Image (tube, rainbow, N blue to C red):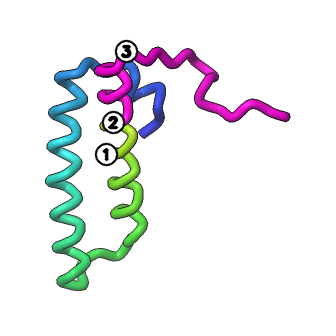
């Protein structure tokens, strides 16, 4: 999931999506433990998506505004 997609979501949508992704992460870990998970990269991607969503929620709580394009590092 891209940051611009996450930023377009409302706070309630983000909270619901975080819960869904955390449940998905538990399922992925269970599948890994039972040797049913073929693409182990899904775990890493899910963790990063959860972190991105939590970051956006926290930024909103603190009142930090991010503008489009400011997510990229500036060239030196």
Check whether the beta carbons of the residues at disc 2 and disc 3 lie within 8 A of each other: no
**Count of number-bearing discs:** 3
Region rendered in magenta: 55-76
- Horizontal side of residue 56 vs 72, given as left or right: left
Q: Quadrant of residue 8?
A: top left
* SS state under label 3: loop
Task: Check disc 1: other Cα within 10 Å, few if <14, some if 14-19, many if 20+.
Answer: some
- Horizontal side of residue 4 vs 61, given as left or right: right
Q: CA distance from mark 2 to mark 3?
A: 15 Å
Dominant secondary structure, magenta: loop
Image coordinates for residue 13, horizontal then vertical, percent:
21, 25
* Residue 20: image tag: none
The residue that mark 2 highlights is: 53
Q: Residue furthest right?
A: 76
Q: Residue furthest front?
A: 62
Say whether residue 62 is magenta: yes
Image coordinates for residue 37, horizontal then vertical, percent:
28, 75
Q: Nearer the viewer, mark 3 or mark 1?
A: 3
Residue name at image x 23 percent, y 21 percent: 11
* Residue 63: image tag: 3
The residue that mark 1 highlights is: 50
Q: CA distance from mark 2 to mark 1?
A: 5 Å
Image coordinates for residue 15, horizontal then vertical, percent:
18, 32
Say whether residue 74 is magenta: yes
């Amino acid at each position: 999931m891209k940051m611009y997609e996450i930023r377009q979501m409302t706070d309630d949508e983000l909270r619901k999506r975080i819960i869904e992704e955390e449940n998905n992460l538990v399922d992925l870990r269970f599948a890994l433990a039972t040797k049913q998970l073929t693409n182990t990269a899904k775990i890493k991607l899910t963790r990063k998506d959860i972190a991105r969503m939590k970051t956006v929620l926290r930024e909103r709580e603190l009142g930090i505004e991010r503008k489009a394009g400011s997510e990229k590092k500036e060239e030196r």
